[in-house]
Image (cartoon, rainbow, N blue to C red):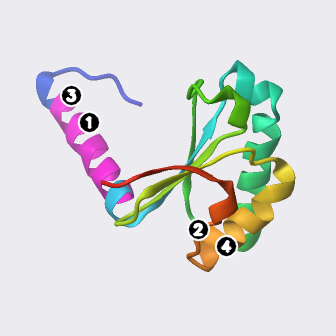
Amino acid sequence: MPKLKSLDDLRRVREQAQSEMKTRLETGTTITVGMGTCGIAAGARETMHAILDELRERNIEAHVTTVGCIGMCVLEPLVDIEQAGKPRITYGNITKDKVSRLIEEHLINGNVVEEWVVGRLQR
């Protein structure tokens, strides 16, 4: 990233970041993996790698990000899927072995895997 030499440079960077975020929120898919100590101990790192591999294999575009402890340690690894215009769904106990079904059902077929849901957030 080039050095910011003026307030106008900063404004341009801010506007670009806001535009990219708006586009991602309005048209894209964001997958968030809880990567606090409890999540990592429960296998969240392996889950995240499985998600990235599955998305790559199926040629699915999604923004994958991580967060710290969400507070539901007993349900780790936790995975949120948020798609434009749909509620954010939080899935619990998503091990690497469950990732293929999660991607198939939720992202490809558009069906929530109800038995793994631990939370929903309407916007």
- C-beta proximity under 8 Å, tags 4 and 2: yes
**In the rendered image of this protein, does residue 90 appear above or below residue 23?**
above
The segment highlighted magenta reads 9-24
Image point (62%, 77%), residue name: 108
Tell me the amino acid under the disc marked 1. Val
Residue furthest toward the left?
8
Residue under label 1: 13
Residue furthest toward the right?
97
Mark 1 Cα within 10 Å, few/some/many (few <14, many 20+)? some
Tell me the amino acid under the disc marked 3. Leu
**Which mark, by number, is residue 10?**
3
Quadrant holding the N terminus: top left
Instruction: Please tell me whether mark 4 sits on a helix, a strand or a loop.
Output: helix
**Residue 20 in magenta stretch:** yes
Q: Is residue 56 visible?
A: no
Q: Which tag is nearer the camera, tag 1 or tag 2?
A: 2
| Residue 22 percent across, percent down from the top left | 28, 53
- Disc 3 to disc 1, C-alpha distance: 5 Å
| Residue 85 percent across, percent down from the top left | 34, 66
- Which comes before the other along the chain, label 1 or label 2? 1
Return the residue nearer the eye: 8 or 70: 70
